[in-house]
Image: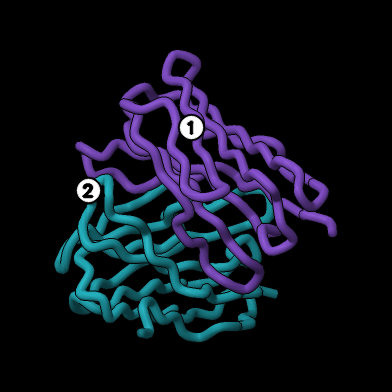
Chain colours: A cyan, B purple
Amino acid sequence: NAGVTQTPKFQVLKTGQSMTLQCAQDMNHNSMYWYRQDPGMGLRLIYYSASEGTTDKGEVPNGYNVSRLNKREFSLRLESAAPSQTSVYFCASTPDRTYNSPLHFGNGTRLTVT
Amino acid sequence: QQQVKQSPQSLIVQKGGISIINCAYENTAFDYFPWYQQFPGKGPALLIAIRPDVSEKKEGRFTISFNKSAKQFSLHIMDSQPGDSATYFCAASISQAGTALIFGKGTTLSVSS
């Protein structure tokens, strides 16, 4: 069972470069999320998609765009990377947004922007 | 404004001891309080969760204690083991509104053998 798969696992970018982080889930979940994790800051929500065809901003959306390509895939794009975007990015999914739907996380993408 | 405050930032406990991690929240509309466990190089995974209509929930060695009037909840790990060494996150959400989880900043637990 793959669960939530994130690619790539590691990436180094130069300031100003762009890239797309890919996320796919095989659990037929409706809702998908992107979080970033920084030391001492916990997990902060960037964007989420409650269902296919919808996306909403989270706590720290600036500098990012997302696409819910289909029910399985939710991508995160950095148009012009900045050093402040150096972080570990986690994609997660849930069956729906009710209280008893735990988040299933991928193993993360570690991004360094120089 | 930080909506979920977690303490301590780090914790060292001897094998067999009790680990206690605390969280406090601001928003009285929160009605779902999970704890997530994260091992190095992995994503977080749900450990245990509670709703505010109960004051305590126990699953094995892990217990959540909830104090609605104080707007606080805590995770207790009994008989702590080296395999419990991980980062723990508390979180909260408003389930009726379907809001995304708000996480605390995390506690790094080290259990020494």
Query: Which is nearer the eye, A49 or A79?
Result: A49
The residues bearing labels 2 and 1 have C-alpha atoms spaced at a distance of 20 Å
Q: Is there CB contact under 8 Å for labels 2 and 1?
A: no
Q: Residue A7 at x, y = what percent?
A: 46, 85
Secondary structure at badge 1 equals: loop
The residue lying at 33 percent from left, 80 percent from top is A24
The residue lying at 26 percent from left, 76 percent from top is A27
The residue beneath circle 2 is A98
What's the amino acid at mark 1? Answer: Gln
The residue lying at 54 percent from left, 76 percent from top is A109
Give the position of the N terminus of chain A as an image quadrant: bottom left
The residue beneath circle 1 is B3
Say few, some or many: other residues with alpha carbon within 10 Å of mark 2 (under 14 / 14 to 19 / 20 or more).
some
Q: Please say whether residue A20 is visible from this viewpoint.
A: no
**Is B41 placed left or right of B2 in the picture?**
right
Q: Residue B106 at x, y = what percent?
A: 62, 47
Q: Residue A90 at x, y = what percent?
A: 48, 67
Q: Is residue A33 above or below residue B27?
A: below
